[in-house]
Image: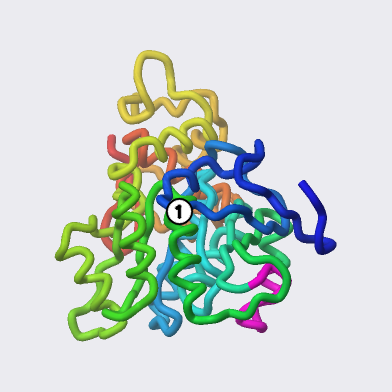
Amino acid sequence: MTADPPGAWRVPRGEASWPARLEHLHSPPHQLWVRGALPSPGAAAVAVVGSRRPTPGGLLSARDIGFQLAVAGIVVVSGLARGIDAASHRGALDGRGCTVAVLGCGIDLCYPREHLPLRNLIAESGCVVSEDGGDAPPDTWRFPRRNRIIAALAEAVIVVEASEKSGALSTARWAADLGREVLAVPGSIRNASSRGSNLLIRDGARPFLEIGDLFESVPALSRALVARSGPPPPGGSAARAAPDDPGEDSVLRRVLDGIGADPVHPDDLAAVLDLPAADLMAALTSLSLRGAITDVCGGRVARTF
């Protein structure tokens, strides 16, 4: 790699660190400019995109999705734009995970400018990338081109609150053309911010209601979580593991025991167990995949036995 300008690295196509998924594009970029460190080759990655002007509920959903992906060991890819993009990046950082921001401007610019602190945080734990070096301006035509990179870097794309003319639908189209799974968070038919998302579902995208929908759509992603949490108990896969035997993982055992006989809200469970939120969410996701717990009304979880 060559360091030019300082802090930004040029990665030519074909170099060992070049993201192999970009080769799925009909016209891959010839180079990437990078701040930070590219994810390891083959790392599980999911894109989260949506409206620049989301509802408060949309922002919460995007941040929660980014968080859950991060604690599952999945790289969160987005575009550093206002709204859903920024929320998903922040969720990944909350979960102490890796997130990749793909810019629609030169690597030396931060657009929008107010996201400079966020950009710097992303570069510390993940990376910021652009097809363009220097201070290339955020021209309108650069964003559809940027969207193809977001779609190509990910194994699936989750659309959170997109209007009928949202640029996020461009990312979804690129993903579909590349054979990636497309999921969308359904919204009210009265909410114009969700019309594009709802149309995606009507046209065949999978509704995203919970993290399990993603794992069912892309089984390889659940394997990434199993690898992060440790191997399943002997005699079966993670999905078939005995629900009362979380293996040797002491955190999983503590969480399962803490749930007890009655449904409990994760916030209450975190207080009782004195566990960091990221560790608790990782454990709950792993236990859910193992069939040991299930979601019930009111956002609570319950044991399955």
Q: Is residue 198 left or right of residue 102?
A: left
User: Of residues 50 and 11, which is closer to you in this image?
Assistant: 11
* 200 relative to 259, above or below: below
Relative to 131, residue 117 above or below? below
Pick the residue in front: 243 or 106.
Answer: 106
Q: Secondary structure at mark 1?
A: loop
- Tell me the quarter of the image containing the C terminus: top left
**Magenta region:** 106-119
Mark yes or no: residue 147 visible: yes
Please provide percent x and percent y for residue 102: 56, 63
Whether residue 187 appears in magenta in the rendering, the answer is: no
* Residue 75: image location, x then y, percent: 54, 50
In the displayed structure, 187 sits above or below 146; it is: below
What residue is shown at x 21% (from left), y 71% (from top)? 198
Q: Is residue 113 magenta?
A: yes
Left or right relative to 102: residue 191: left
* Image coords of residue 134 (percent x, y): 73, 70
Residue at label 1? 27
